[in-house]
Each structure stands twice: as C-alpha cells, then as structure tokens.
Amino acid sequence: MLFKNITIIDENYKAVPHQNILVRKNKIAYIGADIPAGDMSDDAGDVYDGTDKIAVPGFFNLHCHAAMTLLRGYGEGLPLYNWLFDKMFPFEATLGDEDIYYGAQLGIAEMIRSGACSFNDMYFCMPSVARAVDEAGFKANLSHGSSTNNGKDDCRFTESNGYAGTMGLLDYVKTLDHDRIHVDAAIHAEYTSGPALCRDVAAFAKEHKLHMHVHISETKKEHDECKERRGMTPTKWFAELGILDVPTTAAHCVRVEPEDMEILASHGVTVSFNPSSNLKLGSGIAPIRSLRDAGVKIGFGTDGVASNNNLNMLEEITLGAMVQKGVEHDPLFLSTSEIFAMACKNGADAQGRPDCGAIKVGNRADILVFDTDRPHMQPMIDPVSNILFSAHSDDIVLNMVDGKILYKDGEYLTLDIEKIIANVKRIVNEKLIKLEGKGL
Amino acid sequence: MLFKNITIIDENYKAVPHQNILVRKNKIAYIGADIPAGDMSDDAGDVYDGTDKIAVPGFFNLHCHAAMTLLRGYGEGLPLYNWLFDKMFPFEATLGDEDIYYGAQLGIAEMIRSGACSFNDMYFCMPSVARAVDEAGFKANLSHGSSTNNGKDDCRFTESNGYAGTMGLLDYVKTLDHDRIHVDAAIHAEYTSGPALCRDVAAFAKEHKLHMHVHISETKKEHDECKERRGMTPTKWFAELGILDVPTTAAHCVRVEPEDMEILASHGVTVSFNPSSNLKLGSGIAPIRSLRDAGVKIGFGTDGVASNNNLNMLEEITLGAMVQKGVEHDPLFLSTSEIFAMACKNGADAQGRPDCGAIKVGNRADILVFDTDRPHMQPMIDPVSNILFSAHSDDIVLNMVDGKILYKDGEYLTLDIEKIIANVKRIVNEKLIKLEGKGL
C-alpha cells in the first residue's frame, strides 16, 4: 500500500508536505519525497492519493471500559451516588459474555472512527472483549479488574476475583497468530482491594511479565478515605505492595500529591489523563504540569462511555490540551508536539509497543488520514494546529491499524456495524425493561 | 415542509419521540404526534422522514469574529504578546472588503455545519460580513467594534472609529426584505476606548434602538489595568458611561468580581461564555455558577477562529458544560435543560429575537436534524444527553434557518463552498507571501 503525495505528521510531530509512505505487511517500509520506482511497482494496485490529506499517527487510548457503551446516557442528571448505586452497578450486574462482546464491538467501532489504534481496557468477561478486538483487527491491552468483591483485607487472588478472568485472557491470547492483544494484570482500585490481593496480583504480574493497570486517586473522597484507612495515599500504598514494580498505567491521578508524583516518576508509571470523565463526574482536573515537571510520563484516555459520554480520542486530546492551557493560564503549556507525544508515543510505550506511536520507517503502520477539504480545516497555515484544535473526528477518512485498513470513507472493513447496533439496541432494550419496566 | 416521525427537543429542552413538525414559510406552524391530514396535503412534496433522527433547536453563537477564519492556526505556539503584535495585528492590517467577505463566508459555512443558526459578530468592513450573512440565508447581529484607535480619552464617535462602519451596516440592512440581520452598536473594550467615545456610542445606541456588544474582563491584565487606570472595573466603568443601558451582550467576563455580577444582572446584560477561546489563550474559566446565582443571563460563544480554532457551537456547548462541572466539582451543575437554554433561548433573547430559540409553534423554524444512526449515538437511552455529550457536529445532517434549509447531507444549498475555499486559499497565500515571504 502506497500513500502518495500526502502531508505527514512525522516522528517529531511536525508536518512535512508531499511525502510518500509505503506500507508492507504491518510495517512502514519507506517514507520520502521521491517514489523509488522498483520498490513500489508491485503495490501499484493499492495507491492512495494523499492530495489535501494528512497522515497522522494513530492514537493510544490509555484508559477505557469499552463495553460500557451499553450504558451511554443512563442515569444522566442523577447525583453521583445514585447514578453509581441505582443505575451503573445494577445494570452492570446483568451483563454477560454476549452483552460485553457487542458492547465492546460498539466501543471499538467508535474508537476506530475517532482516531484510536489501540486501547487499554479493564473490565470483566474480558475474553469476550478480546474476541471483539481480534475480529476488528484492532489493538488492545486487556485486563480483568481484580477486586476483593467487598471482601476482607486478607482476600487472595483467586478464581472469583480476577485470577480466572486473567487466566482466561492469557489462554485466549495463546490461540492468536498476532501480537495485537496484550494481557495486563489489574487491580481495580485501592477502595475495592486489600493488601493480600495486591501482593498476589503484583507477584502474578512479575511471574507472567505483564504490565499493570490501576485506578489511582480519581476523586477527593477516594484519596482522602485511603489516607484515613491505610495511613497513606493510594499511590504510596500500591508502591509498597509492589503493584508499581512492573510497567504500570495509572488512570486519573486527579488528586495525587507531590510525594505521589515522585513515586510515580521513579517507578516509570504512565498516568492516563482522562479529562472528559474527570470533568463530567465533577472529579476535577489532573495536575498535568506538576506531573510532567516531576518526570511522570502522561498519556490520554477516554474512560468508559458512562462518564464521557463517547470514546472519541481526538476530542479527548483537544479537550485535555485546552483545559490545561486554561487552568495553567499559559497558552504555551503543552506544545503541539508534546500533545502528540502524549497521545501517540507515550501511549505506545505504556502498552509495551516500542515500534508504535509515530509514522516512522520500521514502525507498525498505525496511520490515520484526515481530509482537509472541509471549511473548518481551511486555510491550512499550520497543519499540526489544525489537526489538534480545528479538526472534527469525522475528518478522519481512513484508519489503518497494524497495516490493515479498518475504516475508509464511512465504511468499516472488519465490522458489521448494522449488526452491532441492532444487537446493542436489542440488549439494552431487554435490560431496561427488566430494570426500569420500560425499554428504549 | 413536514418533518415526519421525528424525536424533538421541545421548548423545555426535553426529548419527545414520534413528533411531526410542519414548517410554513419561516415559522413552525404545527407540532404533534398526529398529522392533521388537510393541513399537510399541500406540503406533500417536502416530507422529511425523521426516523432515527432528532430535531434540535439551532444554536446562537453570541460572540464571533467570523472573518478571522483567515487567520486559522497563524502564530500557533507563540507567546501571547508576539502572537498578537507580530502575527494577528499585522495580518489584520492587510484585510479589506473582499478578504472579509470570503473570510466571513467560510466562517458562516463552518457555523452552518456545526449547528449555529445565528451569531454576533464584531469586526470591521462589516457591510461585507452582512452581505455574506444575507446571501447565505443565515442570521446575525453585526457590529463594528468602535475604538479610539489608540487615541485620547476625549476621542469622539467619528467616521474613522466606528461611526462610518455602523452607519454602513444600518444602510445595508435598510436594503433587505427580511429581518435576519440586526445591527448592534459596539465598543471594542475598555483598553481600546475612552469615556467620550463610550458616551457617544451609548447615546447612538439609544437613539437608534440598537443592542450593544462589548468585550469585558477577558484577561487578568485587562481587568487589573482598568482598575488602575480608571479606578474601577471595566463593568462598572461601562455601566457609568451608559454602555449597559441598552440590551447588551458582554463577551468573556472571565475576571468579573461580585459587584460586577450585580451590575450585569441589574442591567439585564447577557454574558457570552466562550470556553474554547478563554482556555486556549490561557485566560481562564468564567465564573458561570456565580454569574448564574447573581441572576446574570448566560449564553455561549465561539469567539474568532484565531483563538479557538474553529467555530463549532456544538463543541463549544459540550466543552463549556464539561469544564463547569469539573471546576465546580459538581456533575449536576448545569442541567441539560439549562445548557440548552443557554445555547438557544438565552442567545435568541440577547439578540432581540423573541420568537427564536426553541422548537415551538409560532417560533421561527431554526431546526437542526441530528442523525442517530452512528456508533457513538447508540444506544439512545437519553437523547438529550446523547446530543450534548456524545454527538459530533458531523451528526448534523440538516440545518434549517428561518424556514430555509441551508445545509443537507453534506451539501450547502446557499453557499458555493468550493469557491469560498479557493478564494480563502488564494487570499491567505497572498497575505503570507507579503508578511512571511512564504505562502501556504
């Protein structure tokens, strides 16, 4: 496949016009202003005209619960406690493998359209999510969120609280002939776990060489109650229990303190900045400048649809950058290349994918194509600025993941979107009738 | 024109499914679950199938400089002072009527695609903007931003600093056979004006029964320097000079103090909340809760493209609502109906358009149609939530303004978008060669 005469956002996240990109199998084989004739001739059938288009590296969504698309808009306008205990938890309690499969498919469909090439997902029935990722041709780091199920501090890592779920994922991944799906270990959060469970999960992650996924200090309540309960912050507690000893992605970190930031930095943790979810739930705004200055790596995540209410990575990136400029009273905070690095390279690194996160020879071919022939994308004085601050996700006319086109000109090439939507409607309708006495 | 079997966002901004809307000339003639046969028969040719669609009232963009589309992305990454004095002002100094006309057309094209039906615009060469609005079939309250041109405090309202511009608008509007364009008076801002000019413009507005448009307390610098210079805040200064005695829209108000809020409330001023611009320039976040609690009316605005960097009202509304929930640490702050009222009814009232701002019998037919057959719009448990928090502006498949369809299924019906983009590219290229020695 040859992208011809296209503007690229290069590995330094600068725009370079009139480039040609050759993709062979799942990798970028060549980038340059000239087309080396011999090398391209056998790909002549797959030439993509890049005139008025920009090739942008795919985004890494570092925190998601994809199947929560099923809960979109449910409980809108309720106080947090009622939203969670009267709506979210009862709905989730009804979910089984088939529900999770279709919910995840819908989430993946959304992500493909809005610029992601990979995501971190922590949920349950995870082999069903893995199946959805595999079939879609997408990438993901998947984890079963371990918790003590409201149990005691001496509760161990057993079948019912994450062990079976994680082993199910590991077994599933063994059957695959590609490396697009990674299995992570996961502790849901401090307030849903205990020290014995954390020690077990940390040991399991080390033994199986897994990355870790965890929620940390999302809300003031969570952070303060942990300090009361454990005599220390969630970050410090996790560090002491060994959770941060493997490469870890920590979602939220809205309430982390200076000492936490040092711990996160020294353990090489990547923070997933999830601005939509943190704003919409009233949790606040993560201290990105302090985290960055402390040397913590930062990426972007959407969180689940229940608190976002979509899985739009381009929106998330733009929102996150704008909000940080505003709260820091500094229009120069987060340069365009820093923002791109957070969304791409930092995300790829956090997922353990060193050959992803930039359009670069030798890297995996994770390439978005933006159409610039739109009123809001003209004039094109600064393509990088236009992508980050002017574009809509619907300007994405092609999404190639690992060398395969998953979406082009409004059509999904690996997903049957009509079937997915029909199944989601059917499932949600049934759940609502059961829970609310009234369907969609 | 009959919208058949469509979900509507009604005048209380609640979703009502399976409705029919009859539009006659520029007004909504009927809304209901039944189709009164006789009444509809002569409109049979214009039936729109509303299955899986939502009819949403058009949004009012309360603060814009539409022609600044020409400057999109120019000076990205520069410190505020250099951005303004080295890039914005020199570029703007080159702009004439033809430039402004095409720049405004591009801005209007963007706004039509992203949900606005009307906008407030303060700039120069305003008859060219009026021509663009008129031809597009759009609505606007247009004003020439008066300033003393760096002159003295005794500078009066004369030809060169706003009088000619405002009279030019009034003359243009007299030639029209519709009321879609209103002329407003405008003072640019405290730091660019003096007391004599303000008194003159206030008297002119009263004499001609015009609304007023003004920038107030956008930045800390502006607010603090005014207090030093005038011994009072910009709000108080304008109030004392009579500027707020006519119906006024005040842009920004990021730095207003409690006494300012009382003044704004008692004068019935509407604040244009422009979250994108205030965030992107590092100005901060307007105190919307305090303003609302003080009784101040609030609407949304995009500001110009130079500081946004698009004119997407749907994005602006979602962003504004999310940011307020986040900074207030309250997910219930700004209910969905409050958000809609700000974007629609408050905007229409501020513009002096009492029969606009809601889908309601007797009102002007300003109707957006959202397609819900998209992954990110399913399931549709709560249509209002999905419109505000899940939708993309590209889900808008129809924009009807004052009873006339301006945009449908990707096509503009009143604008030649290819010609507009070609002209904008040509103009910007010429300017850049002149200013930077290098074109697009």
Image: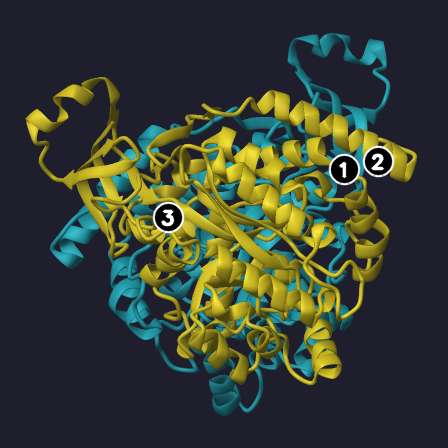
Chain colours: A yellow, B cyan
Q: Disc 2 vs disc 3: Cβ atoms closer than 8 Å?
A: no
User: Which quadrant of the view contains residue A286?
Assistant: bottom right
Whether residue B155 can be seen here: no
* Side of A391 relative to B358 (left or right): left
Looking at the figure, which quarter contains the N terminus of chain B? top right
Residue A356 in sight? yes
- Residue type of the residue flagged with mark 3: Ile
Q: Say which amino acid is labelled 1.
A: Ile
Above or below, A266 against B59 in this view is below
Given residues B45 and A26, the one toward you in this image is: A26
CA distance for labels 2 and 3 = 39 Å
Checking the image for residue A387, the label placed there is: 3
Left or right, residue A208 beside residue B37: left
Per the model, the C-alpha gap separating discs 1 and 3 is 32 Å
Name the side, left or right, on which A107 lies relative to A344: right
Pointer 1 and pointer 3: residues touching (CB < 8 Å)?
no
Specify the subunit that label 3 lies on. Answer: A
Task: Mark 1 and mark 2 in contact? Answer it, CB < 8 Å.
Answer: yes
Residue occupying image coordinates x 67% and y 65% = A197
Residue that mark 2 sits on: A432
Question: Which label lies toward us, 1 or 2?
Answer: 2
- How far apart are labels 1 and 2 at the CA level? 9 Å
Q: Position of residue B67 (x, y in %)?
A: 39, 49
Please, is residue B37 above or below residue A304 in the view? above
Circle 1 or circle 3, nearest the eye: 1
Badge 2 marks a residue whose secondary structure is helix
Q: What residue did someone put label 1 on? A: B381
